[in-house]
Every structure is written in C-alpha cells, then in structure tokens.
Image (tube, helix red, strand yellow):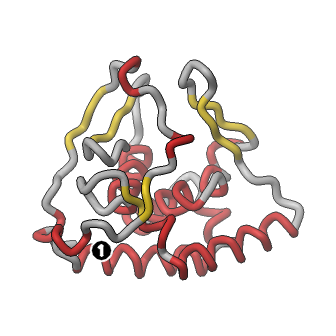
Amino acid sequence: YKPGTDKIYLSGGPFDVETIVHELGHAMDAKGPLGNLYQSLSNKKYQKIFNQEMDSYVKKGNIRCTARYDENDNYIVSNNTKGEKYATVDGLEMFAECYTYIILGQCNSDKVILKHFPQTLQCVREMVEETRKEGNLARKGTAKPYPTQWKPNWQNNKPWEIKMLNKYKNYKH
C-alpha cells in the first residue's frame, strides 16, 4: 500500500484474500488517502502496548521476523516460517496483520498475535473503530509520516494496482 496514492501495489501473484486485506490494513492505518500518515506510529497507547508485548515476546526466546528493501528494491524477509511471524517485523506490519485478523478471523500471524500480542490486537480493534467513526476531514494530520527507509522505488515496478475507496466516512461495517 502506498499512502500518497491510496493504492495497493501488487506484483507477481496470484494473491490470496489475506494479502489484499493486509494491504487494506495499511490503508486503514494510514487513515485513507490523506498523504503519508500512519496512526500506529503516533498512537502512544498502541506504541506502548506493542513495545511491551514485543519485549516480552523476545525475552521468551522468540526471534523477530525482519524485512528490508535491498539495493534493487527487492523486499527481503527473514525469520518468517510460513509467514506466521510477519507481524513481528514492526508496528506497521503488526497493525496490518491484526486488521487482517479482525476482518477475516484469521491471518498468517494469528497464532503469534493471539498468544503473544493480545493487548496489541485489542488496541488495534479500538483504533479501527475510532477511525471508522471519523470523517475524512477529521483525519487529516493525525498521524506520523511514512518512514522513508521503507519506501521502495515505485517507478521501476509495473505493479497491478487496486484503487482504494477514498470515502471511508460513509462506510458501514
């Protein structure tokens, strides 16, 4: 998901429903097409809970998943057996995986989330509900910028684009 364009970029494929809902989770985290904003980076309650549960997860001997873009803008993921630990990359991916679980009742990381991050999941539920209640104008400028170190070079890709709905205030769940 690229917040500035409010589009999901997928290449390769085919893609399952979980992948698409995960990317929609990033859109919900970014609060729609309002620029480079993520509430998971600025919500102090979320950050505190996520960091506490992550510290506990690591102290129990668990290894976090890591992800990065290499010099050719290829996305490299490590320590992620069958995708089950992808939520442990960072707070952004945790939010998107929790969102996927909330919407579908399952996600690749659901065992890790349910066992080690139950309070983070509850916090995401609350954030999603609050976001659904807000109108588009109320959302502007409420979150931190997209971290530049995670931005791939979109111009070199020829991704399949899915245009996101940009009017969340009329959305009924």
Relative height, residue 145 to residue 102 (above, below) = above
What residue lies at 26% left-to-right and 46% top-to-bottom? 6
Q: In this view, does 87 lie to the left or right of 167?
A: right
Relative height, residue 15 to residue 118 (above, below) = above
Residue 148 position in % (x across, y down): 50, 43
What residue lies at 43% left-to-right and 77% top-to-bottom? 125
Q: Is residue 3 left or right of residue 108?
A: left
What residue lies at 57% left-to-right and 31% top-to-bottom? 75
Residue 172 position in % (x across, y down): 16, 72
The residue type indicated by label 1 comes to Thr
Q: Which of 40 and 171 is in front in this view?
A: 40
- Sort mark 1 into few (<14), some (14-19) or many (20+) by Cα contacts within 10 Å: many
Relative height, residue 74 to residue 45 (above, below) = above
Circle 1: element type: helix
What residue lies at 36% left-to-right and 52% top-to-bottom? 36
Q: Which of 89 and 21 is in front in this view?
A: 89
Residue 45 position in % (x across, y down): 54, 82
Q: Is residue 123 left or right of residue 88?
A: left
Question: Which residue is at the far left?
Answer: 170
Q: In which quarter of the image is residue 47?
A: bottom right
Image quadrant where one finds the C terminus: bottom left
Badge 1 is on which residue?
Answer: 131
How many marks can you see? 1
Image quadrant where one finds the N terminus: top left
Q: In this view, does 135 lie to the left or right of 148?
A: left
Q: In which quarter of the image is residue 51?
A: bottom right
Q: Quadrant of residue 119?
A: bottom right
